[in-house]
Image (tube, rainbow, N blue to C red):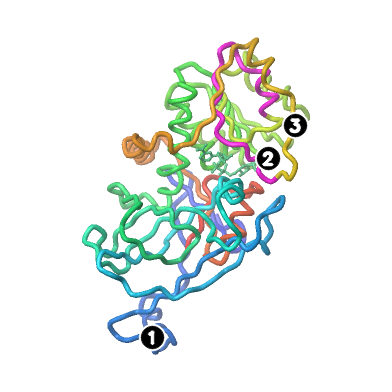
Amino acid sequence: MGQAAGVHHVTLNGISSWSMRGNGQNGTAHLTSWLFSKERQSTQWWYRMVRAKSWTLRKHFEGFPKTSDFELKEVELPKLKDGDVLFEAVFLSVDPYMRPYSGRIMKEGDIMIGSQVARVVESKNPTYPVGTYVVANSGWKTHFISDGKDLQLLPPWPEKIPRSLALGTIGMPGLTAYFGLFEICKIRAGDTVLVTAAAGAVGSVVGQIAKIGGCKVVGCAGSDKKVAYLKQIGFDEAFNYKAVGSLEEALRKASPAGYDCYFDNVGGEFSSIVLNQMKKFGRIAVCGAISGYNDTVPQKGPYVQIPMIFKELYMEGFLVSRWNHKRDEALKILLRWVVEGKIKCEEHVTEGFEKMPAAFMGMLKGENLGKAVVKV
Ligand code: NDP
């Protein structure tokens, strides 16, 4: 717990206890400070002015993102119209996809893309009464007004489960693990499954679902602490890919007979090496390629055809949104596994909306164990 200033780790299911640091203000102090604040003085009693902060992409990333690529802005939100809902962010997600998608779908000056768990604070829409929680793809914003479309209501949520998990194990990353394993890898009991970025949001769930499915699981991660965590949550084998002399040998040692399934989160050279250790008719789910997201010149590598042909491999890229029609059903299963303790969840929580860029860059560097989230 309490790793670096403003950052703490949250663990669920018996490894350590759930704890969140507050901002040190109790409710009365908060109310008193608001009553005498400039915000209060410039507010008519029936209408509370809301100033929303947002992070924009000031400059397209070149190579690894820099603090100066982001800009914090603040705007005053209008009054709600009939049908409108005012949300405030509770937890925001920082994810690897933001790096490649920023170049594909964003212009300089746009608000950074991303999802958040948000709470209704004012409503003129009966579907979303005050206090309702949703997951919204509203970008890096502290507040936003919605007409109620394109919001995902949280399923009935047990009190003991942090709602931040709706951005992780019981959200998009968990679904990615679930569909990648069942729809692409088509895991069977007895398979040996390899997963990279194994201690992250997707990877840690991949390993645990594969164990539920009766597989042997091998995970690779970038620190000894992450490797220890993987063993703690039930991985059969795990190694620190940054510390081994030879990746070929480390992979061979972890599973001398090779791999039936490879859940590829990193791409690049690592994955080229893995191809040669797949078993005949092995299945590869190409989920992510984080090892190349910050490259200015695309990587060149050994090409896939020879091992693909002689091992008769099946390799398929996917986006989790392909299975949106099965999303609710899969979320119920993931929630149940978490409640039953079959899937353990770790979160890397950064406190403070101002720290969004730092949390994002930290995640890309591998500072996170489990899902990287920001608590407002
Ligand atoms: P993680 O929580 O795993 O965080 C990213 C991790 O990537 C870091 O912690 C780091 O772990 C690892 N990493 C960073 N740089 C490298 C590198 N050069 N080589 C190897 N590993 C690296 O993120 P997610 O679980 O959210 O995402 C994992 C992958 O899944 C990403 O590639 C992402 O784009 C992809 N993804 C794909 C989706 C889809 O629909 N296809 C949906 C969601 C995610 P370490 O310390 O181990 O290096």
Using the numbered discs, state the Cα–Cα distance from disc 2 to disc 1 in whole angstroms: 49 Å
Report whether 34 appears left or right of 371: left
The crowd level at tag 3 (other Cα within 10 Å; few <14, some 14-19, many 20+) is few
46 and 243: which one is in front? Answer: 46
Question: Which residue corresponds to mark 2?
Answer: 292
Amino acid on which disc 1 is placed: Arg
**Residue behind mark 1:** 40
Eyeballing the image, is 135 above or below 210? below
Looking at mark 2, is its residue's CB closer than 8 Å to ligand 1?
yes
Give the mark, 3 or 2, whose residue is nearer the N terminus.
2
Residue 52 image offset from top left, x and y in percent: 45, 71
| Residue at the image point whose x is 46% and y is 45% from the top | 168
Earlier in the chain: of badge 3 and badge 1, it is: 1
The quadrant of the rendered image in which ligand 1 is seen is top right
Marks 3 and 1 in Cβ contact (< 8 Å)? no
Q: Amino acid at mark 2?
A: Gly
Which residue lies under the disc numbered 3? 300
Q: Residue at x 40, y 83 (%)?
A: 34
Do tag 2 and tag 1 residues touch (Cβ < 8 Å)? no
Q: Nearer the viewer, residue 268 or 261?
A: 268
Q: Secondary structure at mark 3?
A: loop
Q: Nearer the viewer, mark 2 or mark 1?
A: 2
**Residue 19 horizontal side relative to residue 61, left or right:** left
Residue at image coords 30%, 69%: 122
Magenta residues? 271-294
Q: Is residue 274 left or right of residue 203?
A: right
Characterize the local packing of mark 1: few (<14), some (14-19) or many (20 or more) Cα atoms within 10 angstroms: some
The answer to whether residue 64 is magenta is no
